[in-house]
Amino acid sequence: MIETVVRKRIEILADTPLAKRVTRAIDKVEISGWTILPVQSGSGRDGPWRDERVTGSDKSLILTIASEEKAGLLSEELAPILSSHGLLLTMWDVEVVRGERF
């Protein structure tokens, strides 16, 4: 049987122009990698929204996996802009193979 370890999966929904700021924070706390996915539409507290590249209000989902310690450091690093810039940060436990990579 393949051995797994528990890590934190972290997803950050942000306006696309903020994606570089988020990935700099990920790099700063020394999380080893990240992925950016485009988001086309959704709905939230303010109702439905759609991808709008012309006005710069398109959204991206930044995904990373990290140890609990590094996940906490990333949360602290992003805390000042979570509300002011409307970021949505979620994290939960996942099992990963090759845990030493995260």
Image (cartoon, rainbow, N blue to C red):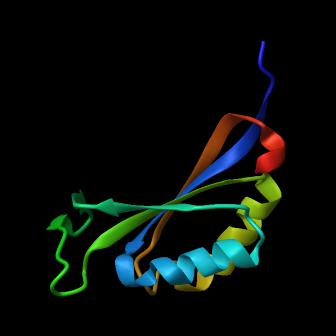
82 relative to 94, above or below: below
Number of labelled discs? 0
In the rendering, at what x and y percent does residue 71 appear? Answer: 71, 61
Is residue 76 in sight in this rendering?
Answer: no
In the rendering, at what x and y percent does residue 41 appear? Answer: 20, 60
> Looking at the rendering, which quadrant does residue 58 occupy?
bottom left
Taking the image as shown, residue 6 lies to the left or right of residue 88, namely right
In the rendering, at what x and y percent does residue 85 appear? Answer: 43, 84
**Residue drawn at the location 78% of the way across and 62% of the way down:** 70
**Residue drawn at the location 78% of the way across and 37% of the way down:** 98
Is residue 81 in sight in this rendering?
Answer: yes
In the rendering, at what x and y percent does residue 29 appear? Answer: 76, 73
**Residue drawn at the location 16% of the way across and 66% of the way down:** 50
* Quadrant of the rendering where the N terminus is positioned: top right
**Residue drawn at the location 17% of the way across and 76% of the way down:** 52
- Kindly give the residue lying farthest to the top in the view shown: 1
> Looking at the rendering, which quadrant does residue 54 occupy?
bottom left
44 relative to 78, above or below: above
Taking the image as shown, residue 84 lies to the left or right of residue 98, namely left
Taking the image as shown, residue 47 lies to the left or right of residue 83, namely left
